Image (spheres, grey):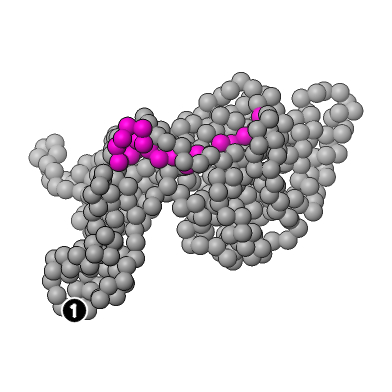
Amino acid sequence: MENTLYLECYSGISGDMTAGALLDLGADQNVLKKVLNSLPLSGFTAKISQVKKAGLLACDFNVILEHENHDHDMHYLHHHEQHSAQQSEHAHTHASEHQHTHEHRGLSEIYSIIQKADMTETARKTAVKIFTILGESEAKAHGTSLEEVHFHEAGAADSIVDIISAAVCLDNLNITNVIIPALYEGTGTIRCQHGILPIPVPAVTNIVQAHRIPLSLTGVQGEFVTPTGAAIAAAVRTSGQLPEHFQIIRTGLGAGKRTYERPSILRAMLIQPDALSGQMHHTDVIYKLETNIDDCSGEAMGYVFECLLSAGAKDVHYFPVYMKKNRPAYQLNVLCSEADISKLEQIIFSQTTTIGIRRQRMERSVLPREIKTLQTEYGSVQVKICKSNDSLFIYPEYESVICICRQTGLPYFEIYRKLQEICSRQLS
């Protein structure tokens, strides 16, 4: 069954806060520990405990390193805001130690670590996606390529563990929809490997810009949105719109390590949309990308169709139209989540001859659905099961149907109807 997660980022988001919130929400600690034990990384220990933040009990996911990197050291991060010579000397000493002990890793090295981990393919893809988004933001900030970018803070073992842990926990909770209306950020400056930077730091601004995530500045001094947190949000966010009515199934609180005026707590809620309205469907938001193309071959259109679906488009279609001067053309339509707009537009621009794309926000109602594998007289088949009030709708998956058709030589609709009858009996 699809699960909808709402991340309430009023106090920002970071990697450890995300992992803590998901563990508090019910992600299996043993599954996570098995994955972390399989990582080809040394020099770290992951500790999961309960702490109090602003009087509230929250889960603290703490990656303890043999060599501290000052990521949670408030003196190192913000002490530069005081200006005595003694403090400057002290901060310089911290910076030297920080530079000496911090690990620098390239994206290919991090991909290799993820590939060697004992984790599901879904979790692995999520972790790769998060690091790719992070890499793109760093490459843009430093004027280099994705292949050449090297991570400093994000290349350290604790950040790698945070990101992999978030991906594993999301998969373990079977999260398919993630609602993040906005990210709330502080103000001021912060010290990092590259020196003293304004908040939000360039990597964060690049991520929210590229992935169209609303950013709200709170006016409170401090960094609440880390690049790791922003990359996680960009990778998993499917919507920015909460349903009008919803029921909270479970709640989890993830504790941050930094001490600011606003407590660093990330609240995660597993919600059931439209429960209060009595409806059996939930609503969400998708986007339609649309463009007219009058100078592109049919072969190119067929290829971009495949590229868009492989990149995560929910649906793609195109049809013939007549444009100005009565020129024959195609109109290409792509349905996608808000988080995938930038990526899919880039594919359309690079793979077709279009020079402009129209964008439309659309609300929709969606029935709850799940994919099940059932055993039949024809072997294993996958079916999609949808529910509406007291009705159950069963749709055999296309690939399962045609596989049986090829084996038996029977017509498609005959196999389709037989599978519906068999599966209905099993599920009744």
Q: Is residue 58 left or right of residue 347?
A: right
Residue lying at 29% horizontally and 37% vertically, measured from the top left: 279
Q: Residue furthest front?
A: 428
282 vs 40, nearest the viewer: 282
Seen as rendered, the residue at the extreme top is 219
Q: As displayed, is residue 422 above or below residue 365?
A: below
Q: Quadrant of the C terminus?
A: bottom left
Asked if one can make out residue 25 in the rendered structure from this viewpoint, the answer is yes
Badge 1 marks a residue whose secondary structure is: helix
x, y percentage for residue 299? 23, 59
Asked if residue 278 lies in the magenta stretch, the reply is yes
Asked if one can make out residue 334 in the rendered structure from this viewpoint, the answer is no
- The residue carrying mark 1 is 408
Q: Where's residue 176, x and y in %?
A: 42, 49
Tell me where the magenta segment starts and ends, as one range: 263-286
Using residue 10 as the reference point, say whether residue 343 is left or right of it.
left
Q: Residue at x 42, y 47 (%)?
A: 3
- Compared to residue 272, the image places residue 261 above or below, namely above
> Residue 267's image quarter?
top right
Q: Quadrant of residue 302?
A: bottom left
- Extreme residue in the left direction: 326
Give the image location of residue 407, x and y in percent. 22, 79
Does residue 251 sit above or below 63 in this rendering?
A: above
What residue is rendered at 47% in x and 45% in y? 236
The amino acid at mark 1 is: Thr
Is 359 on the left-hand or right-hand side of 236?
A: left
Q: Is residue 134 left or right of residue 153?
A: left
| 124 inside magenta stretch | no
Residue farthest toward the right in the current orientation of the protein: 86
**Camera-side residue of 112 and 96:** 112
- At 70% across and 53% down in the image, what residue appears? 46
Crowding at dot 1, Cα within 10 Å, few <14 / some 14-19 / many 20+, comes out as few
